[in-house]
Amino acid sequence: MKIGAPKEIAPGEARVALTPESALQLQKLGHDCFIEAGAGKAAGFDDAAYRDAGVSIIDGGAKALWDAVDTVIKVREPYEEEAHYLHKGQTLISFFWPAQNEAMLETCKGQGASVIAMDMVPRISRAQKMDALSSMANIAGYRAVIEAGNNFGRFFTGQVTAAGKVPPAKVLVIGAGVAGLAAIGTATSLGAVVRAFDVRPEVSEQIESMGAEFLFLDFDESQDGSETGGYAAPSSPEFREKQLECFRAQAPDIDIVITTALIPGRPAPKLWLEDMVEAMKPGSVIIDLAAEKGGNCDLTKPDERVVSDNGVVVVGYTDFPSRMATQASLLYATNIRHMVADLTPEKDGVVVHNMEDDVIRGATVTHQGEITYPPPPPKVKAIAAAQPKPKEKEPTPEEKKAAELASFKAQTKQQVSLIAVAAALLLAVGLVAPASFMQHFIVFVLSVFIGFQVIWKVAHSLHTPLMSVTNAISSIVILGALIQIGSSSLLITVLAAAGIFMASINIFGGFLVTRRMLAMFQKS
Amino acid sequence: MVYGFTIATYVVAAVLFILSLGGLSGQESAKRAVWYGAVGMAIAVIGTLIGPGQGLWPASLVLIALGAAVGYQLANRVKMTQMPELVAIMHSLVGLAAVIVGFNADIMINTIADIYTANDLVFGAVGADGYTAIGLPQQINDGLSSFGQLIAKKSSVEITILRVELVLGIWIGAVTFTGSIIAYGKLAGRVNTAAQKLPGGHLLNAAAAIGSLVLVFAYLGGAGSWTLILLTLLALFIGYHLIMGIGGADMPVVVSMLNSYSGWAAAAIGFSLGNDLLIVVGALVGSSGAILSYIMCKAMNRSFISVILGGFGGPSGPAAEIEGEQIAIDANGVAAALNDADSVVIVPGYGMAVAQAQNAVNELTRKLRAAGKEVRFGIHPVAGRLPGHMNVLLAEAKVPYDIVLEMDEINDDLSSTDVVIVIGSNDIVNPAAQDDPNSPIAGMPVLEVWNAKQVFVCKRGQGTGYSGIENPLFFKENTRMFYGDAKSSIESLLPQID
């Protein structure tokens, strides 16, 4: 199978769908690779590098390449003119956005080509390696922080220097998808104080794992992300109000806002309103990663950097991945390569367009002259449904008091009954036993009592020394043997002598070994 | 009192013993505390030697010196991994000593009774007040040893109580004696560690216990000393059979239980000798052992009775099926993960002790800490074969004790930990205890290592732990099995950590 990548014709697009590295891998799958001359230049791969990797360079322009290959791999969705290059039986793999590009879908169908949309790869574990949205979002998130740093006049990290104290930058990330999490990670590693918000409470753990603080919104109706394949869904007006209130409170304190909130198939929700921008300090930066879909911020203008009246910079670039073209191309080409690998299960260069496969079926939007979008829901759910957390009712003060009282009463009851039983037993013993016994018995009971009080305080780590020391002192039975050894009876003397000997082994052995153990405990 | 001074030394010794146990609440004060105990013991022995124990005192001193020499050798030769065995075997000595002292008391009672008969007097007869014993004529009394005098002036009620006490002392001492020897054998690997019972099982124990009770009444009824000997034999059997029936995993409970018994035996002997210091110390040791047993049982979520009766109760339903497979990893993989990690928690178990891996573990800890990583240890209360076993081993390897934490201290932190290394422990990290209500260990508190980002289990092979329960942890997605001997496995990691 011949696979080729044309030069991207979208203005400003620097990425390329084939890198020398991915070409090598594709060849291992039995495919021949082609590239339009100069296609990788903007991403930092010149023709010589491709040639070294065994890629054939097509000089005659885009049309020549489209004609020469069976499968075209691209980054951006095809332009009208490109779509017309498609011929029957050809396959196109690229971003496509079928929901927004219905006309293009028709055109491609008309040309009889199969189109695999990289943005339609279902979000299941098996397909992660070809999830180009995630890999691009990752880059966007990283780049957003770098872009913010570029526009922000201060350090990210807090420092105390001889020239004065620098407070750390405070960053708010709205939307903790892949891009948001990447932004959180980058900002925290630069030393900023990062807070993050997401409508899906289950991502709080991910946010906290990246080192940011999750802005918790106290609201009953929470979304279960698993229902929507891990994406956010639109929220109710009440929820939105609560959310905006939370952001409004944050605005004066925050230096950098990075918004990444998108809802699949809808314009981006407006989350950072004009009054919040006004409340921010001059010199603050807003990076709107949702600019392409209209932006999360009121002031966002797609592809532009605007400065508000109060000196807040609002960046609405839509080409963050393209601004890191080398990295983006490497990752995207790898995603494409994995997709092709799934299409050639036998690794023999023969493409099998298996419409039974969840991933391939999901990503295919036109096939054999038919539009196959939207796909049926995948058989495997993207992520496990969140376990509904059993909600514990916050007890009212009265209930608390009542519970405390009840437990106090129960404790008292238990203690009193214990004491009563013990006292009754003691008295019963006292009725029959002579006074001489009772004197010793008092000593015994008190000693048990002291023992219980003292031993509970012993540290867990010292339980072994405790055993060896109690072992040593329980050899106090030596006193009995010592008293008996002077007896007139030979038998008693011999037995007592044996007792003394054994007990003294125990005394010395026990104390010495305890001392040895304790000497080993050292502080760091 | 003639021996007022001796009593005074006993008071001092008792206070020192209490301080000694109380001092074990912290590592630093413990170093002082052990000296309190030793000094207390010395004072008590000296006080006895110049008081009621002055008969044949040179012989006593020689015997003590001999015992000291043996004890010194023992204490210095023993390896820290053998600590459980040492403690167990020393308990047996206390038990035996208690039996001996008890028998001596019985012999002395008979001797005194003979003297009474020879003088045509009634042993234990009371005087006009109906309470004080008449006792022997002055010149005969003076001829007796101090212990003899003590018995000679007892009334008949007191004699009966004395007999009850010494029977108790002998019985508990004998159980402790054989029990400790079996525990020693199991811990040292000389006796099969699996729970074993003779045919008849607990019925045999029950029969022996009832037999003992019958013999006690026979003895108190004046049947003679043969009952006492028979009783001792029965007690020896109970000790043997009871501990044989308890599996190796329950040894922490067994050892602390025997510790407790040796204390109660000493207390019982103290009663029969009328010696308050023995009573005090016996009570202290007895309650200490009882508390330790309680803590150990609690840590295993088992009742004391079920431990004593041995073996696990049958599961209430089929254990949950475990899906997935155990994925092995080599030293390179573990080392790479460790190099990437910021926080590491090590969970040692009996396997570390068996492989003598504590020094390698310390070396690993040192290297990881030098690389700026946070390394901590999570110790389950029943890890090892003795309460606090792991702490002692780690201390021996010079792991600083302030990074060695208890289960409750570290459980909450495990979810934010990058790498957990489980070295030779199994049941104490078994998630089935929480997830599977049918598991035999359901409800036992465990270290929640599976919450960490990555878990490496250092283990000899694929077998189950002491309890024979499958461990779903080994099948989890974030778990990798690092097979091999713990010591050589950890050592193979060392050169790769930087």
Image: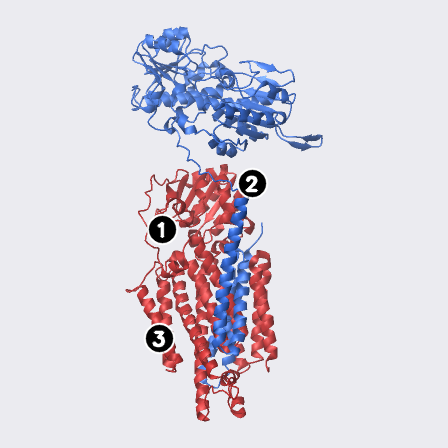
| Residue of label 1 | B440
Mark 3 — residue? B214
Instruction: Give the residue number, with chain letter if any, for mark 2.
Output: B372
- The subunit carrying tag 2 is B
Looking at the rendered structure, whether the residues under marks 1 and 2 are on a common chain is answered as yes
Which comes before the other along the chain, label 2 or label 3?
Answer: 3
| Chain containing mark 1 | B
Q: Mark 2: few, some, or many residues within 10 Å (few <14, many ≥20)?
A: few
In front here: A285 or A138?
A285
- What is the drawing colour of chain A? blue
| Percent x, y of residue B88 | 44, 64
**Nearer-N-terminus badge (1/3):** 3
Say which label, 1 or 2, has the lower sequence index. 2
Q: Distance between the residues labelled 2 and 3?
A: 68 Å
> What colour is chain B?
red
Label 1 or label 3, whichever lies nearer to me, is: 3
Q: Tell me which amino acid carries mark 3.
A: Val
Q: What residue type is labelled 1?
A: Pro
